[in-house]
Image (cartoon, rainbow, N blue to C red):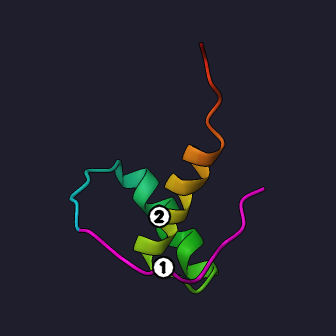
């Protein structure tokens, strides 16, 4: 299950292009959890990577 975290230590800058609908939904969830948009994106990516199934 996805659980919202509040802290991270080290950052590196990257630019991403995301669909507007995805940005809007991420922003909404971030605001509901009192998080920055950036932290919400990080947590979603971590969750996806940790829950990826090996397709081979």
The image shows a total of numbered marks equal to 2
Find numbered disc 2 in the image and state the secondary structure of the residue it sits on: helix
Mark 2 and mark 1 residues within 8 Å of each other at the beta carbon:
yes
Residue at image coords 40%, 72%? 38
> How far apart are labels 2 and 1 at the CA level?
9 Å
Mark sitting on residue 42: 2
Q: Which residues are magenta?
A: 1-12
- The residue beneath circle 1 is 8
At 58% across and 86% down in the image, what residue appears? 34
Quadrant position of the C terminus in the picture: top right
Left or right relative to 18: residue 25: right
Instruction: Give the residue drawn at x 54%, y 55%.
Output: 46
Left/right of residue 23 with respect to residue 2 in the rendered view: left
Q: Secondary structure at mark 1?
A: loop
Indicate whether residue 11 is drawn in magenta: yes
Front tag of 2 and 1: 1
Identify the mark at residue 27; answer none if there is no mark. none
In the picture as drawn, the residue positioned furthest to the top comes out as 56
Mark 1 surroundings: few (<14), some (14-19) or many (≥20) residues within 10 A: few
Residue 17, position as x, y percentages in the image: 25, 50
User: Residue 11's spot in the image, x, y percent?
Assistant: 32, 74
Q: Is residue 5 above or below residue 23?
A: below
Where residue 50 sits in the image (x, y, percent)? 62, 47
Above or below residue 18? Residue 24 is: below
Predominant secondary structure, magenta span: loop
């Amino acid at each position: 299950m996805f659980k919202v975290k509040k802290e991270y230590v080290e950052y590196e800058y990257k630019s991403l292009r995301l669909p507007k609908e995805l940005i809007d939904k991420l922003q909404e969830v971030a605001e509901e959890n009192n998080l920055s948009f950036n932290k919400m994106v990080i947590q979603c990516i971590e969750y996806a990577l940790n829950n990826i199934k090996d397709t081979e």
